[in-house]
Amino acid sequence: MQVKVGDRIVVRGHHVGDPNRDCEVLEVHGTDGGPPYLVRWGDTGHTTLFFPGPDAVVQGREPTTK
Amino acid sequence: MRVIDCVRRSAIGIGPERTIADVAEIMDQTGVGALAVIDQGRIVGLVTDRDLVRRGLARSVSPDARVDTVMTADVVTVEAEADLHDVFAIFRTHAIRRLPVVRGGEFVGMVTVDDLVIDLAADLSDLARPITGEVLFAHRDPPG
């Protein structure tokens, strides 16, 4: 994953009924836009380091299905 | 299969200066039971919901105490490019259910027993399908 400061990342819920969560990228700690990222979570306002897995996509860059 | 290909979920990291109360709140709101404690890009510990109970609550540690007072230091890790069998070997010899994945010493994700079991169950189901078909619907040559 490659992002820039200000991008939003969406993490899909892991359990049935879980909502998706999203966070805003505050700092990019990796090289060339790579992880880890310092993020602020939209629902709680907490800041954490974020290490994206396959459950995370950059908002606006979700894979399209035909 | 490489270990990094078996990481199923994003991971969350925090600095060692964060408080136990912070950690509990983050776990509650994210549904994540283990956070990596990161200092200067390196994993210096792992804190689980169980650590909060056993090393925190049970010992009357203040919720304002730093997380590194209750975390597990000297964490067992596995390299991202290692083979999945290395993970099985580690889970076989250590009483842990979550294994931090590192690349060049830097934390990149977490592989868990739960995720591996789910993957294995799916694989077993795929393998069982032709056997089940044969058992239930035996192929017999027509008489004559």
Image: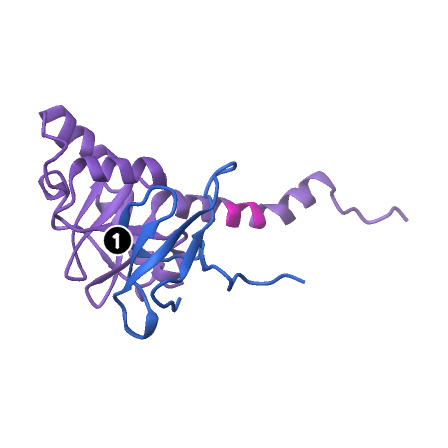
Chain colours: A blue, B purple
Residue A21 vs residue A27: left or right? right
Quick one: SS at disc 1? strand
The answer to which image quadrant residue A56 occupies is bottom left
- Does residue B110 show up? no
Residue B21 sits above or below residue B83 on the image:
above
Percent position (x, y) of residue B17? 12, 47
Q: Quadrant of the C terminus of chain A?
A: bottom right
Residue B123 vs residue B141: left or right? left
Give the residue furthest to the bottom: A32
Residue B43 highlighted magenta (yes or no): no
Amino acid residing under circle 1? Pro
Residue B40 sits above or below residue B133 on the image:
below
What residue is disc 1 on?
A: B100
Q: Nearer the viewer, residue A4 or B103?
A: A4
- Which residue is found at the position 12% from the left and 35% from the top? B64
Range of magenta residues = B122-126
Percent position (x, y) of residue B85? 33, 57
Percent position (x, y) of residue A3? 38, 67
Secondary structure predominantly adopted by residues drawn in magenta: helix
Residue B124 highlighted magenta (yes or no): yes
